[in-house]
Image (cartoon, rainbow, N blue to C red):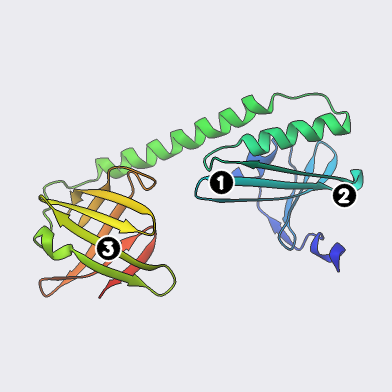
Amino acid sequence: NLDETKTPHTPVRLDAIAKALNPDTAQLSYCMGWLCYDHRGKKVLSHGGMIDGFRVQVTLLPGENLGVAVLANLQETRMNAAVTNSLLDLYCGLEARDWNAFFRKVVDQEAADRRAVRNARDAARKPDAKPSLPLARYAGEYTHPAYGSLTVSCAEGKLALAWSNFACPLEHFEADTFRVTHGFFDDKLVTFTAAAGAATGVRFADQEFTKK
């Protein structure tokens, strides 16, 4: 049964996921909770995860009786993968490779891609499209069946959104869409829906919340 969890079941198309693991990856498959790929001739089973402020990378080399777990108290980092690949090379007697430089390029490219998307978004913006409601009418509690409640407040002519432990000051972007100006969700867009002169919902973090 344990071997079955490490058996490839679903082929994964080679894309940024594979290249972000190892530039030599020729095939990537998904097992039961594990990504299976080739690391310079060695079969690797790997799984990573992250939550606010933390990231972990767990890697197994079944043929080498090796397991590596690298944890970091940062979310947006590729350090875990760079350290893991360096340890695999060292343990297996492979020629050393500068994984820091490799992942630096990956991170820089991802940042460039995000800037391009943001620039295209901002270029298409219609700043003269005013909100359909007075700001105070967006205030209130909004709920989601899985993600709980968030609160929108209005003070001194500005909106702010609070969800869980996140505080998101908002500024107008266009129409009923506002931009987060600070914090974890910085630069993300928040879009309200309105009907009959009242706010009915808000889209935040790719989830639809309904006004109470």
Residue 62: mark in rendering: 2
* Label pair 1/3, CB-CB below 8 angstroms: no
Q: Quadrant of residue 177?
A: bottom left
Position of the N terminus by quadrant: bottom right
- Pointer 1: what residue? 54
Residue 36 to residue 120: above or below: below
Which secondary structure, mark 1? strand
Mark 1 is on which residue type? Phe
Marks 1, 2: nearer the viewer? 1
Can residue 200 be seen here? The reply is yes
Please provide percent x and percent y for residue 77.
Answer: 56, 37
Find residue 151 and name its label: 3
Q: Which residue reaches farthest front?
A: 165
Dividing the image into 4 quarters, which one contains the C terminus? Answer: bottom left
Callout 3 secondary element: strand
The picture places residue 32, in percent across and down from the top left corner, at: 74, 63
Dot 2: element: helix
* 32 left or right of 190 in image: right
Q: Distance between the residues labelled 2 and 3?
A: 49 Å
Q: As shown in the figure, which amino acid type bears the numbered disc 2? A: Pro
Q: Residue at x 42, y 39 (%)?
A: 114
- Left or right of 161: which side holds 25? right
Report the Cα–Cα distance between label 1 and label 3.
Answer: 26 Å
How crowded is the residue under tag 2: few (<14 C-alpha within 10 Å), some, or many (20+)? few
Q: In this view, does 134 lie to the left or right of 166?
A: left
Q: Distance between the residues labelled 1 and 2?
A: 26 Å
Q: Which of 100 and 117 is in front in this view?
A: 100
Q: What residue is drawn where x is 10% and y is 51%?
A: 157
Q: Mark 2, mark 3: which one is toward the viewer?
A: 3
Depicted 206 relative to depicted 91: above or below: below
